[in-house]
Amino acid sequence: MPSTLRHLLFIVAPLLIVFAILPGVYENHLMLFNFVVFLILAQGVNVIYGFTGYLPFGYVGFFGGGAYGFAMMVMHAHAPAPLALIVAGVAAVLLGLLLTPLLRLSGAYFAIANLAASLAVLHFVANPALEDITRGPYGVSLTATFNPNAAYWAALLVLALTLGVVVFLKNSRFGLALQAVREDPVSAAMAGVSVVRMRVVAWLASALIAGLAGGVYAWYVSVFFPDNVFSGTFSIFAIVFALFGGVATIIGPIVGVLILYGVYNLIGFTTPQYFQLIYGLLIMGLVLFLPAGLVSLATRRGWHVP
Amino acid sequence: MLVYALVAGLLFGLYFSLVGIGLNLVFGVMRIVNLAHGDFLMLGAFIAVGVSALAALDPLFAVPLAFVVFVLVGLVLYRLLVPRLQGSVNPEMLSIILFFGLSQVIEALTTIAFGTSERSIPSSELGAILAPLRVRLFGDADGPVELFGQTFPATWAISAMVSVIAIGLVYVYLYRTRLGTLTRAVMSRRDEAFATGINVDRVSAAAFGIGLGLAAVAGVFAPFMFGSVTPAFGEDATVTSFAVVVLGSLGNPLGTALGGVVYGISYMLVQTYLSSWADLLPYVLLILILLLRPSGLLGRRVRVA
Amino acid sequence: MSPEPTPILQADGLVKRFGGFYALGGLTFHVAPGEILGLVGPNGSGKTTAINVISGLYAPDGGRVTFEGRSIGGLASHRLVHLGINRTFQVPKPFLSLTVRQNIEVALAYGRSASAPPSIESLLQEYRLAEVADRPAQDLNNVQQKTLDLVRALATGPRLLLLDELAAGLNPTELDWIASRIRSLAQAGMAIIVVEHLMGFIEQITDRVIVMNAGKEIFEGTLAVAVKVPEVIEVFLGGEHAA
């Protein structure tokens, strides 16, 4: 069996089926929805960080951009939710295009510039001077499209699409070439790889993923403020979840989300500062002792991890 | 109005230089991105609050205390974290995540210890010890300071003065001491410094300690410059520090002094004339500066001798 | 001697500046298919810069480079690879976390070789990497990494190959082996430019050398003649390779 099919059959399909069944047997739908959103975002981080090495510290910029793309279509164009969702993705891709010059920066410079970019978008959207367009800091309310059930299914669809992208990267020459660029751009160019084009494609793909996630989030919650959808927590959680499991794999980010977001839901809400402490220590321990994530426990032994 | 904005910008700018300089020293020497920088600032502020509230002393006394305490903290943290980090595949990238984790730990511990309420210090307390001097210079012991026909809070002037002194001392350290000279050598050519037998570890540990010490000293004045502080203050302080540091060129600590002043003045100008967009400034400025000093699409282009 | 075939690469007055420093100050030379040309000269004479300009790492600031009659100055590296130029690096940087096989697969897939490139198995066998084929490149020793770098270049089916200090760090047995590989590549029609400090190695494999000093060629001919030219001797005695 080709490995693409194997990955789709034994990783992607079971995960999607479980999250399709769970709403019927477990009543905290918001939590399930958040799990799906973080699975999408962690895989989106995987696409850009895992395969190209760019650490997207301001990844939430695309998420928030998507959420506001959705909201503006609904508020101003009275668009139906599915159309608004597509626009959410397009909005994030446009923002990604605008930010492609950032790809010129390497290492920490990129991470910092990306963080600054996401904060700039937040302050732009939340500016009271733009109240007529974005409602500024006062937030949006989208009663016309309110339908959490449909939004949940849309989120599953976006997750399926995202996992499809990651499976493709893991099994294609394109994904291999991306990793070559990550390891050494000069050698990659000398292998005939167009470094710039590869990076831009991966960057826009990860922007699209986050934008669609932002769109379904806006659809699901229907009332939100700029500070909610541009909260740095989304970037950080997505990055840490992906790293914790192990990037440049399909299952790493999935494992990371299931474990860490699970822990978060057990202790996070009641005593946030204790969660923050544990979470901070976990991150530090991860970097110091397991920088390649949980999957490296297996790869170190020579086992292949999809 | 313009004069006010310029002078206020200069005062804030000098202070911002102090805010950023420690971050830049650490990055310059170790290529480590200390995302917990702002949290050490926040801890410095809490030391000032403690000195003022518990010991009823002039918060200026918190300056040497904060510096010494955090130099020591820095030396310990260096031993615990940095060697292991430097041994990893991609230290620069992983340092971002490691120090983000540290910032979370600091913020959580501070919240657990002190709660989330806003802390401030009455502005009359800062520089109380300087009262005789001020009576001689300005004729009164408290109240605002007059510069170029404009009045400013005395705390701004004191913070700016201490910042100038601190930056001057950093200059003396880097250019007039042996360890400082070695520090500059490591900053300019880290790989070669290893080869020439410089004790890079010792230089780095010192730079790390001093970097955190300077952050804490900057923090002492944060309650006066920003009105109040909470444990969550660190995050904003980190981003501001980055804007300042990048403006003055990453890896060059004294460039930060210039960066701070440019940042402070532009901040005050935008605040005065275009106030609703002032929040955007640090971020847009940061991105523009980063992009206008590109390191090339292929990252570090020169890989061959 | 047979009449010289048409050059595959021709450099005319190549200039490369770094700030005010002229790393190349009007370098002119050519290389023909099937020929092995040595670039020699003291450190800082511009040998590696010449290779970097020809392989697209730097755009030239002046002069002309033509490859198979086409001007290539300033083209991006991957475009040059597609045209049929490749190189190795003094310090090889393979894709460390990818396996040796994957390293080669990338070059095979993206090299767009005009001729049918050799198969991955034959490359692995011929260059003694078969045993480590499925290990990540970071497990390789220095010599194996250099070999992998060479194989990465060969996988794109180049007609012009630039070798930057390939021999440095190899033991005598390995040197003989790599020299025989290079010669057989040239016999198959590949033009090869070798930058090297080891004069014995240069003497063993090159048909012709260009001696460079301060970014210009000062001698062209065989190494045996070169060592008798006063100007060349002075450059080397003045440099660090006097011995």
Image (cartoon, coloured by chain):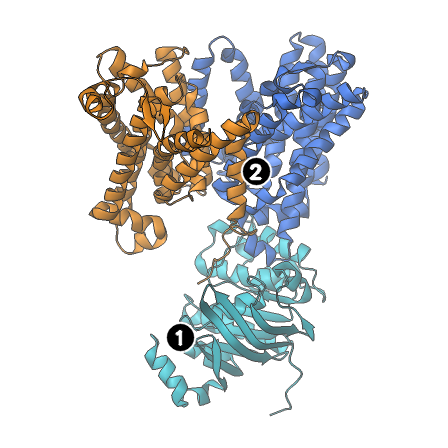
Distance from the alpha carbon under mark 1 to that under mark 2: 42 Å
Quarter where residue B125 is shown: top left
Q: Closest to the observer: C13 or B224?
A: B224
Residue that label 2 marks: A49
The x and y percentages for residue C137 are 51, 51
- Packing grade of label 2 (10 A; few <14, some 14-19, many >=20) is many
- Packing grade of label 1 (10 A; few <14, some 14-19, many >=20) is many
Disc marking residue C42? 1
Disc marking residue A253? none
The hue of chain B in the figure is: orange
* Chain drawn blue in the picture: A
In this rendering, position of residue A261 left or right of residue B94: right
* The furthest residue to the front: B149
The x and y percentages for residue A116 are 53, 33
* Chain drawn cyan in the picture: C
The x and y percentages for residue C34 are 62, 79
